Amino acid sequence: MAIFAAILGIVVASVLTSNIVFSQSVGICPLLGVSKKMDSAVGMGLAVTFVNTLASVVCFLLYKLLIVWDLEYLDILTFILVIAALVQALDIVLKKFSPTLYSALGVYLPLITTNCAIFLTVNMMVSEGYVAMGTGLGLLYTAFYAFAVGIGFLLALVLMAGVRGRDEIALIPKPFRGFPIALIAAGLIALAFSGFLGI
């Protein structure tokens, strides 16, 4: 029961109270670049969730090996290589099986490699102490944490796509059209997310 409560706390915190975009201001580039259309926002959110979860699990196991071999100083290089390899694999799979999503994501798909949301999640796995736990429990917490961060990122993209979808029909003064109104909307959504801090 304590493990379930801990996992529930990790998920709620990662999706709402510590949302990677609206609470920590990480991953703003894809948020503004891909959130113009709902289908590309959902596709990007799912791709980031997949890469985030898989990269965190693989990096957790590799970091355990680095500890055994006394090579922890290679952690950043290892994390970057794992994330880049997974994104390249995702790029190949999407190009073959979903060309419409591949073209909708455009330049933002390769940018998942340098997406600071994924890199921060992998680093948080170490700083949150999940690596210091036993391999089974630490791996479980890492997987749920990474998945929940990805779902929080997906939620942020979907919310922004919903708001930005109304930009064309709303009466917005000319100086605020485009990115200025998107940044204002992101700020207001972030302010709303700060209401979850008491949970």
Image (spheres, grey):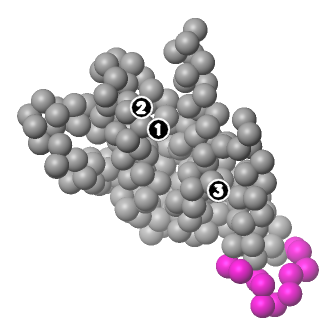
Q: Between marks 3 and 1, how big is the CA–CA gap?
A: 16 Å
Q: Give, as a three-letter code, the residue at label 1.
A: Ala
Q: Which residue is mark 3?
A: 22
Q: Is residue 176 magenta?
A: yes
Of the numbered discs in the image, which one, if any, rests on residue 146? 1
Q: Earlier in the sequence, mark 2 or mark 3?
A: 3
Q: Between marks 2 and 3, how big is the CA–CA gap?
A: 21 Å
Q: Residue at x 67, y 42 (%)?
A: 16
Judge by depth and name the residue closer to the eye, 129 or 85: 129
**Res 72 quadrant in image:** top left
Estimate the x, y position of residue 95 in percent, counting from the top left. 40, 55
Regarding residue 54, the answer to whether it shows in the image is no
Residue farthest to the front, as pictured: 198
Q: Secondary structure at mark 1?
A: helix
Q: Seen in the image, is 6 located left or right of residue 174?
A: left
> Which image quarter holds the N terminus?
top right
- The stretch of residues the image draws in magenta is 169-180
Q: Give, as a three-letter code, the residue at label 2.
A: Thr
Q: Seen in the image, is 1 located left or right of residue 111?
A: right
Q: Between marks 1 and 2, how big is the CA–CA gap?
A: 6 Å
Q: Is residue 135 magenta?
A: no
Q: Give, as a three-letter code, the residue at label 3.
A: Phe
How many residues crowd around disc 3 within 10 Å: few (fewer than 14), some, or many (20 or more)?
many
**Res 34 quadrant in image:** bottom right
> Which image quarter holds the C terminus?
top right
Estimate the x, y position of residue 120 in percent, counting from the top left. 42, 51
Of the numbered discs in the image, which one, if any, rests on residue 142? 2
